[in-house]
């Protein structure tokens, strides 16, 4: 069904031709505007949404051939039909290659003009519908992807909390590490996106412990080097588990959260500022929470003792800028709020 409320701009330097077309198109129900030159046409296009331009190829000053690409660039949703003398068919075809929808030849046979206008507007309408449908589909796919990601991350998060709950020594650890890490990130002035990455990395940093032997993890005595090495696989394993659903930054934070700033950590391949900032932040938050929690082989340090330990290990285990930021945050309040 043709929507006759569409607006048509007739661009021709000959007033009789404009009047002729306007009369016919108006009778058919279209809203018509006229322009006697390219400059006038651009003015009309700026002030009104125009669905179709009938554009004379030959005009004094800027020609229709010159105006066509300008319209295509500035008004890509406006269809253009070229008006041409019979002898100019080659030029008209050239114009179609440059984006004109069709052409009509002078002297006009008005029924043919109407057919061309109706067909062009129908084609334009279909193109817009297809584009809108594609955009709608893309948006739907994006929404579904986000939803799947959210559900998956939620499931992994639930798994982490379930793992922690099973073990009285680590209950609530990931949530506290996240709160502390986010506070450090804010103190360092990280962007909201980086804070969001840090939040996910904090919640998921120990998910790899699913691969760790519970007997070794809960061993009351000192760990042998082999046992320590076994426990430390959790950083690498955890990065692999979350890789399909989080961005690379989060993966790297998890993979390197036990790296020491001076490079002295187990099997460490990068050191110093090469360790991703998020991983350096997690390292401090993680170690602080571990120090202030009971462990099978020792009881918790006091807050003051743990803070002193962070100070003592600044520049060796911990990155100086991160440790300095950590020492500024109200960690006692954060830990209390989490209990
Ligand atoms: Fe860890």
Image (cartoon, grey):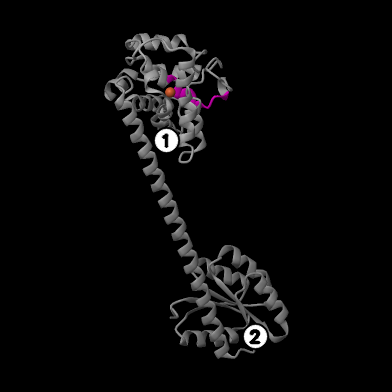
How many marks the image carries: the answer is: 2
Mark 1 crowdedness (10 Å alpha carbons): few <14, some 14-19, many ≥20: some
**Percent x, y for residue 339?**
26, 22
Which numbered disc, 2 or 1, marks the residue closer to the eye?
Answer: 1
**Percent x, y for residue 119?**
53, 80
Q: Between 178 and 174, which is closer to the camera in this rendering? A: 174
Q: Quadrant of residue 180?
A: top left
Q: Is residue 25 above or below residue 245?
A: below
Ranked by sequence position, the earlier of labels 2 and 1 is 2
Query: In the displayed structure, does residue 25 sit left or right of residue 106?
Result: left
Mark 2 crowdedness (10 Å alpha carbons): few <14, some 14-19, many ≥20: some
Identify the residue at image location x=46%, y=39%.
246
Q: Are marks 2 and 1 in contact (CB under 8 Å)?
A: no
Identify the residue at image location x=49%, y=79%.
32
Identify the residue position indicated by label 1 in the image. 196
Q: Is mark 2 within 8 Å of ligand 1?
A: no
- The secondary element bearing badge 1 is classed as helix
Q: Magenta segment, which residues?
A: 274-284
């Amino acid at each position: 069904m043709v929507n006759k409320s569409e607006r048509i701009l007739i661009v021709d330097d000959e007033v009789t031709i404009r009047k002729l077309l306007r009369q016919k198109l108006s009778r058919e129900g279209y809203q018509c505007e006229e322009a006697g030159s390219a400059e006038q046409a651009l003015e009309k296009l700026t002030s009104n949404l125009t669905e179709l331009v009938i554009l004379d190829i030959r005009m004094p000053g800027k020609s229709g051939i010159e105006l066509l690409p300008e319209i295509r660039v500035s008004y890509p949703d406006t269809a253009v039909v070229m008006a041409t003398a019979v002898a100019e068919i080659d030029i008209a075809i050239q114009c179609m290659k440059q984006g004109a929808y069709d052409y009509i030849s002078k002297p006009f046979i008005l029924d043919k003009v109407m057919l061309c206008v109706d067909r062009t507007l129908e084609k334009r309408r279909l193109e817009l519908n297809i584009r809108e449908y594609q955009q709608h589909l893309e948006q739907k796919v994006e929404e579904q992807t986000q939803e799947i990601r959210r559900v998956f991350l939620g499931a992994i998060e639930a798994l982490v909390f379930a793992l922690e709950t099973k073990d009285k020594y680590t209950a609530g650890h990931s949530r506290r590490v996240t709160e502390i890490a986010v506070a450090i990130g804010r103190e360092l002035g990280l962007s909201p996106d980086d804070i969001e990455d840090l939040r996910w990395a904090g919640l998921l940093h120990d998910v790899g412990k699913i691969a760790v032997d519970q007997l070794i993890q809960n061993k009351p005595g000192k760990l042998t080097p082999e046992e320590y090495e076994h426990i430390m696989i959790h950083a690498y394993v955890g990065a692999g588990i979350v890789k399909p659903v989080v961005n690379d930054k989060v993966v790297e934070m998890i993979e390197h959260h036990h790296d020491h700033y001076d490079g002295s950590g187990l099997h460490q391949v990068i050191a110093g500022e090469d360790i991703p900032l998020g991983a350096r932040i997690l390292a401090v938050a993680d170690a602080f929470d571990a120090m202030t929690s009971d462990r099978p082989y020792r009881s918790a340090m006091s807050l003051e003792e743990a803070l002193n330990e962070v100070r003592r290990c600044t520049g060796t285990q911990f990155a100086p800028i991160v440790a300095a930021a950590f020492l500024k945050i109200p960690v006692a309040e954060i830990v209390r709020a989490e209990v």
